[in-house]
């Protein structure tokens, strides 16, 4: 092969490589950044066998109601509302987290609830309290009573008395949306 042919072939190969390199460097890669899931749209609390259980996931809560235990939990001895053990039921994807647990943060007042919000609290006396506000859950947890409420005797899933907790802003209205959400959540 002559010197000119070798030079031409080398130049052609170099040109192709430069073109390929240029094509690669002009591409803009976009990473999709997923917003973190807060899981703060609902909260469930159960007083059971001397412990206070808290759940931020409806499926984990339902499993607990069926079995009486939770597979994954975070326990704080003596930290419950009345000095009992405080048990946070966790989803399997949350079991290794040390922070950022919605149930823990909402319970401790460090995370605001989403709007709309739904909550349930099952008391040892068999009453089932239903909430549309995290602030109302905290007030009932602290005092043991709901200042404003609509009580329906025997309408719960196992015939419990259901207490729809109201507050100063909605105490004069029938809680149509809250009652409907309760019935939907509990398949009534």
Image (tube, rainbow, N blue to C red):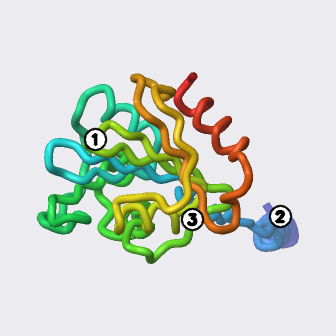
Q: Position of residue 20 (x, y in %)?
A: 79, 64
Viewer-proximal residue among 79 and 110: 79
Q: Residues within 10 Å of mark 2 (few under 14, many from 20)?
A: few
Q: In this view, does 54 lie to the left or right of 29?
A: left
Viewer-proximal residue among 127 and 67: 127
Going by the picture, which residue comes out furthest to the bottom? 110
Q: Position of residue 154 (x, y in %)?
A: 46, 26
- Residue named by callout 1: 125
Compute the Cα span from label 2 to label 3. 58 Å
Q: How crowded is mark 1: few (under 14 residues within 10 Å), some or many (20 or more)?
A: few
Residue shown at 29%/58% (left/top)?
96
Compute the Cα span from label 2 to label 1. 80 Å
Residue shown at 71%/46% (left/top)?
174
Is residue 148 something that shows in the picture? Answer: yes
Disc on res. 113: 3
Precedes in sequence: disc 1 or disc 3: 3
Residue shown at 40%/59% (left/top)?
145
Disc on res. 82: none
- Residue named by callout 2: 16
């Amino acid at each position: 092969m002559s010197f000119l042919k070798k030079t031409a072939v080398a130049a052609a190969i170099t040109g192709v490589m430069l073109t390929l390199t240029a094509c690669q460097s002009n591409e803009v890669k976009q990473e999709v950044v997923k917003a973190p899931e807060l899981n703060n749209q609902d909260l469930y609390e159960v007083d059971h066998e001397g412990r206070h259980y808290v759940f931020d996931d409806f499926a984990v809560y339902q499993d607990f109601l069926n079995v009486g235990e939770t597979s994954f939990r975070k326990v704080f001895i003596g930290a419950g509302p009345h000095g009992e053990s405080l048990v946070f039921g966790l989803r399997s994807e949350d079991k290794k987290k040390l922070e950022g647990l919605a149930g823990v943060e909402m319970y401790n007042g460090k995370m605001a609830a989403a709007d709309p919000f739904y909550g349930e609290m099952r008391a040892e006396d068999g009453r089932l309290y239903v909430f549309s506000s995290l602030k109302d859950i905290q007030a009932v947890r602290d005092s043991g009573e709901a200042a404003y409420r609509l009580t329906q005797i025997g309408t719960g899933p196992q015939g419990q008395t259901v207490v729809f907790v109201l507050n100063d802003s909605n105490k004069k209205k029938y809680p149509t949306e809250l009652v409907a959400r309760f019935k939907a959540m509990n398949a009534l």
